[in-house]
Image: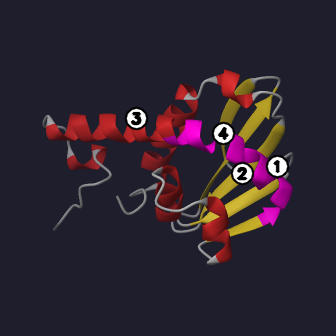
């Protein structure tokens, strides 16, 4: 996968990923942060509060930190190819706001990664079973 093909696919995968994240792994983590996928010019925000998770499209004013990156970089982080700090230090990701919040998020990245990878695997299985190439982020469309 080289990132998401468009904002619609990104939203479908991201929203399903966060639905699969067990709120128990949050512990006392209360924060609001956003992502900006620069290649798609698409943003979403995550609200972690009181052991609950809410994901919304767009940036919201309560966001304390924004992580700006290509959707491909997000995929690389979620699949364990690189970590967020490496992405930041190599200019693949830009952190706007609290670096401390990014460090706090490291406590859930493994769990988030597992949820993300399960969503990606399901999409691949559906595509291999005859689904459309649009459902498979790993498959490139040719014209």
Q: Residue furthest left?
A: 130
In 3D space, how far apart are the residues under numbered discs 3 and 4 (Cα atoms)?
Answer: 16 Å
Q: Which of marks 4 and 2 precedes in the sequence?
A: 2
Residue picked out by circle 1: 63
Q: Quadrant of the N terminus?
A: bottom left
Front one among 93 and 81 = 81
Q: Is residue 55 above or below residue 86?
A: above
Q: Residues within 10 Å of mark 2 (few under 14, many from 20)?
A: many
Magenta segment main secondary structure = helix
Horizontal and vertical percent position of residue 36: 64, 60
Q: Secondary structure at mark 4?
A: helix
Q: Are marks 2 and 1 in contact (CB under 8 Å)?
A: yes
Residue picked out by circle 4: 108
Q: Are marks 3 and 1 in contact (CB under 8 Å)?
A: no
Q: Quadrant of the C terminus?
A: bottom left
Residue picked out by circle 2: 34
Residue picked out by circle 3: 118
């Amino acid at each position: 996968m080289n990132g998401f093909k468009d904002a619609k696919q990104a939203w479908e995968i991201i929203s399903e990923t966060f639905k699969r994240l067990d709120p128990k792994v949050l512990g006392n983590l209360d924060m609001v942060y956003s992502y900006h996928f620069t290649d798609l010019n698409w943003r979403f925000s995550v609200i972690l509060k009181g052991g609950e998770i809410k994901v919304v499209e767009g940036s919201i004013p309560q966001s304390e930190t924004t992580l700006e990156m290509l959707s491909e970089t997000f995929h690389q982080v979620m699949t364990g190819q690189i970590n967020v700090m490496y992405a930041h230090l190599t200019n693949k990701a830009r952190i706007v706001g609290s670096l401390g919040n990014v460090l706090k998020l490291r406590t859930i990245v493994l769990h988030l990664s597992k949820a993300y990878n399960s969503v990606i695997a399901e999409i691949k299985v559906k595509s291999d079973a005859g689904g459309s190439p649009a459902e498979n982020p790993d498959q490139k469309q040719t014209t």
